[in-house]
Image: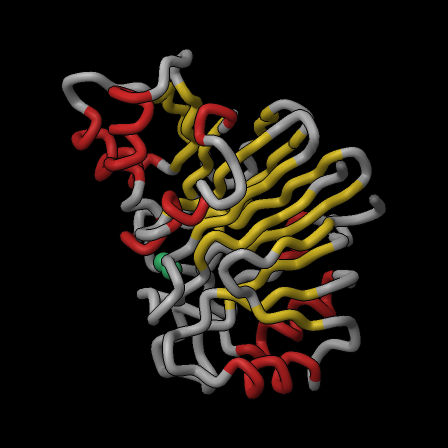
Amino acid sequence: MGLTLTVLGCGGTYAGPGNACSGYLLRTAATTVLCDLGPGALANAQRHIDLVDVDAIVLTHEHADHWTDLPVTRNVYRYVLDRPPLPVFATAGTQALARPFCLGGDPFSWTTIRDESRVEVGDLAFTFSRTDHPVETLAVLVESGGASLVYSADTGPGWSPVAFGVRPDLAVIEATFDHEHSNPVHLTATQAGERAAAVGARALVLTHLLPGTDPAGQRAAAEAAYDGPVHIAEPGLTFAVGAP
Ligand SMILES: [Zn+2]
Ligand SMILES: [Zn+2]
């Protein structure tokens, strides 16, 4: 099994009906990582994996829609599963908010990540890049066995996946808005498409759509800016990354 990404939740800012907030499952035959853990993502993860098999958790930033299932995830690893401390890679700001929930028995081993950090988990190599967002937010490059994907986390138009210097097989880019805002802390679908084109991504997944935004309209806007295949993230969808 090559590298796959499964969407656990992709609601932008909050989750609409039937969705969860941001959460992605990254897997190879040897390694299982949860990348972001917004409300609802933990429940959906169990549709695909046994939680005892998780090798690490990566949290891109401190906004509540990206990590607030962690306090209840703590309950699983503290009280239910018997395993060594689970590595959590998170920004300093995320840790400042999350670690107080883990007092009195912290089942996690924490590592601070920042711009240009590189970490390895099993056969996955992660590189992080600071995005254009009001708090320290890290986009993620994941590489494994020649396959690569970029996840934008949350960003405004001041960041591009070109920052990683890698042409990814899959670009998972946020497209919160369907029109430009005067306070651009997120991207439009057009801007997501432009970024996929700029980095030469082989395929694009639009994610973090604000509930109520028309997915077909977002897809069309991205397709106008990018020639490759455009997908809309939905909970439960799995994407094979790179060659099988
Ligand atoms: Zn968000
Ligand atoms: Zn955010």
**Residue drawn where x is 37% and y is 76% of the image:** 211
Instruction: Give the color scheme: rainbow, by chain, secondary structure or one colour.
Output: secondary structure
Number of dots carrying numbers: 0
Q: Is residue 138 left or right of residue 38?
A: right
Query: Residue pushed farthest front?
Result: 47
**Residue drawn where x is 57% and y is 27% of the image:** 119
For this rendering, which residue is in front, 142 or 216?
A: 216
Figure quadrant of the C terminus: top right
- On screen, 225 above or below 110? below
Residue 17, given in percent of the width and then of the height, sits at 34, 70
For this rendering, which residue is in front, 1 or 64?
A: 1
Q: Is residue 190 left or right of residue 79?
A: right
Figure quadrant of the N terminus: top right
Residue 76, given in percent of the width and then of the height, sits at 30, 28
Q: Is residue 2 left or right of residue 231?
A: right
The part of the image, by quadrant, that contains residue 219 is bottom right
**Residue drawn where x is 48% and y is 85% of the image:** 214
Residue 10, given in percent of the width and then of the height, sits at 45, 61
Residue 41, given in percent of the width and then of the height, sits at 39, 49
**Residue drawn where x is 44% and y is 79% of the image:** 177
Q: Is residue 229 left or right of residue 164?
A: right
- On screen, 179 above or below 151? below
The part of the image, by quadrant, that contains residue 52 is top left
Query: Residue pushed farthest right?
Result: 243
The picture quadrant for ligand 2 comes to: bottom left
